Amino acid sequence: MSKNPVFAFLITALMIMVATPAFPEEELFDTATASRHMEQGVALLKAKQYDAAINEFEESASINPDAQAYYYLGYAYYLKGRGGDEKSRKNARDNFAKAYEIDPSFTPSKFKSTETLQTEVVTQHENQTLPSGPDARKSLPQSQPTSTTTKPNP
């Protein structure tokens, strides 16, 4: 009988040692390094250094292949390709497609600062022009009349 508690203790200790890894679990991706490359790439985009930004975004995507990395990589190629560089335009399309393949519901606006979004909304509002001329009233949205119930006359 005295061997049973010792045996049970040894089995329990063995199970705990097998279940607990000897080394701490490593992250699958080095997200901190990837984030640094993303931040550097965004700074380079703002400085219009598209080739350097592309290198940073490619490095970020190779470390942590997520939708954000491929989206910004596509955006850098898009900006570079605006001058007519057809290869950059193709790379932009390919990277945008890869971003949305990874995450179909990816929304790049969630990575913009609030100040940037407010500026875009104000700019869009300022760029809207109201219709003018004799048909101006026809092109404005019409409000729907509210329905009221009336009692029939006796």
Image (cartoon, rainbow, N blue to C red):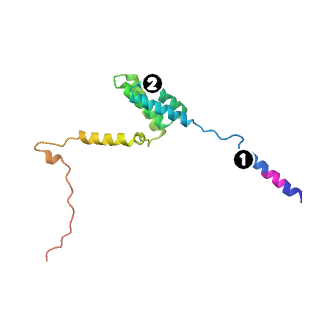
> Can you tell which mark lies on residue 19?
1
The boundaries of the magenta stretch are 7-12
Give the farthest residue toward the left: 134
As shown in the figure, which amino acid type bears the numbered disc 1? Ala
Report the front residue among 60 and 65.
Answer: 60
The image quadrant of residue 105 is: top left
Residue 52, numbered label: 2
The answer to whether residue 136 is above or below residue 48 is below
**Residue pictured at 72% horizontal, 47% vertical:** 19
Quarter of the image with the C terminus in it: bottom left
- The reply to whether callout 1 and callout 2 are in contact (CB within 8 Å) is no
Residue 128 in which image quadrant: top left
Q: Position of residue 69 (x, y in %)?
A: 47, 34
17 left or right of 121? right
Q: What element carries label 1?
A: helix
- Amino acid found under the numbered disc labelled 2: Ala
Residue 8 is one of the magenta-drawn residues: yes
Q: Position of residue 1 (x, y in %)?
A: 89, 60
Query: Counting residues from the N terminus, which is met first, the one under dot 1 or under dot 2?
Result: 1
Q: Residue 11 at x, y = what percent?
A: 80, 51
For numbered disc 2, what is the local secondary structure? helix
Nearer to the camera, 119 or 142: 119
Was residue 9 drawn as part of the magenta stretch in this picture? yes
Callout in the foreground (1, 2):
2
Residue 46 screen position, x and y as percent: 39, 30
Q: Which mark is residue 149?
A: none
* Residue 112 sits above or below residue 47 on the image: below
Vertical arrangement, residue 11 with respect to residue 103, above or below: below
Seen at 14% across and 45% down, the residue is 136
Local crowd size for mark 2, using a 10 Å CA cut-off: few (<14), some (14–19), many (≥20): some
The crowd level at tag 1 (other Cα within 10 Å; few <14, some 14-19, many 20+) is few
Residue farthest toward the bottom in the current orientation of the protein: 154
